[in-house]
Image: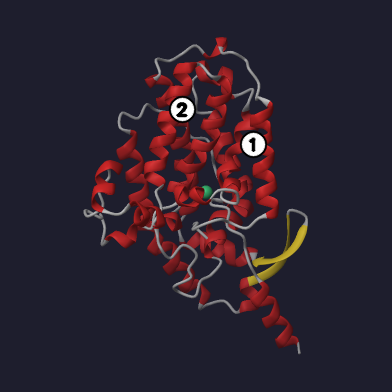
Amino acid sequence: MKKAFLSLLLSCYVLPCFCWGFYAHRKINYYAVFLLPPEMMVLYKPHIAFLSDHAVDPDKRRYAIKAEGPRHFIDIDCYGPPPFPDLPRKWEDAVKKYPEDSLLSKGIVPWWVQVMQQRLTSAFREKNQVRILKISAELGHYIADAHVPLHACSNHNGQHTGQEGIHGFWESRLPELLAEKHWDFYIGKAAYIPNTASYIWNRVLESAAAADTVLRYEKELNTRYSPDRKYAFESRNGIISRQYSSEYSVAYDKSMQGMIERRMRESVYAVASFWFTAWVNAGQPNLKDLSGKTFTTEELQEFERLNESWKNNSVKGKSCE
Ligand SMILES: [Zn+2]
């Protein structure tokens, strides 16, 4: 009876995937603000709560719009062996070689980061405060996703290797458990990135290279833990739920020798550096004399719609889960 109950619990166990987890996305944008020069800090610091809260809007949009899902990942291993010479790095060349549908179905995160970077540069040129803040928050999300190994691997959630749940384990459970108390986010200063396209492609290639370690080390650890030590009932956001136990989580993190902390720190650095680069490329506008405009009713309604879709719908189209 006890066994039957346990296996029922096991089968009910689902850890939601929020791409780096809502917690980590908010933290990444938050910490990125502190890497900015004073000329940018005048705008970003007073709006740090907005930049953190809206770091997760792109994930919420996955529940509203089908086109959103592919912007968060790339199944780069579908394009042959590393370093994937068959995959053109420029979108115009990629669509000449592969049908657009096929590219979309395998994910487009490195290209989408570039689209958002251009939008942010334009927003700075226009000195449009609300657009600068909104696009900065969302650009931060996509850059951070590009740093997650399982966002650059078709075995996103260990579904091909019997490791379902590993996606949320790596990017939600571990940062929530360890980031605040044990990881260091003193990172220094944002830097100008001369070539943002090659920068983000390099991060994606690193993610792809690390995916094997992420999967292999968990598989190996799993052989040394019985299910009752691997999982535990713990409080998460005030709700008692079954998750990877703290003991198992810490052991997994240790086996990867700080990989998650490192990728989170690199995300913070990249986010701040992309924001900074957009501002420089726009001619370093004085951010003290922006319009000071607030969001229009329509824009506020859009935020509300995203929240409603996220709460009430399931993910539309293909996503990283
Ligand atoms: Zn995402």
123 on left or right of 23: left
Q: Nearer the viewer, residue 120 or 203?
A: 120
Q: Quadrant of residue 257?
A: bottom left
The spot of residue 302 in percent (x, y) is 64, 36
Q: Nearer the viewer, residue 40 or 124?
A: 124
Q: Secondary structure at mark 1?
A: helix
The residue sitting at 55% across, 29% down in the picture is: 33
The residue sitting at 57% across, 59% down in the picture is: 168
Which is more N-terminal, label 1 or label 2? 2
The residue sitting at 26% across, 52% down in the picture is: 87
The residue sitting at 75% across, 86% down in the picture is: 2
Q: Amino acid at mark 2?
A: Leu
* The N terminus: image quadrant: bottom right
Q: Secondary structure at mark 2?
A: helix
- Separation of residues labelled 2 and 1 (CA atoms): 19 Å
Q: Quadrant of residue 290?
A: top right
Query: For mark 1, what is the residue?
Result: 302
**In the image, the residue with mark 1 has its CB under 8 Å from the nearest atom of ligand 1:** no
Residue 283 vertical placement versus 188 (above, below): above
* View extreme (top): residue: 289
User: Residue 120 — which label?
Assistant: 2
Q: Residues within 10 Å of mark 2 (few under 14, many from 20)?
A: many
Residue 143 vertical placement versus 32 (above, below): below
**In the image, the residue with mark 2 has its CB under 8 Å from the nearest atom of ligand 1:** no
Q: Amino acid at mark 1?
A: Glu
Dot in front, 2 or 1: 1
The spot of residue 253 in percent (x, y) is 52, 59
> Mark 2 and 1 residues: CB-CB less than 8 Å, in contact?
no
Residue 189 shows up from this direction: no
The spot of residue 297 in percent (x, y) is 69, 27
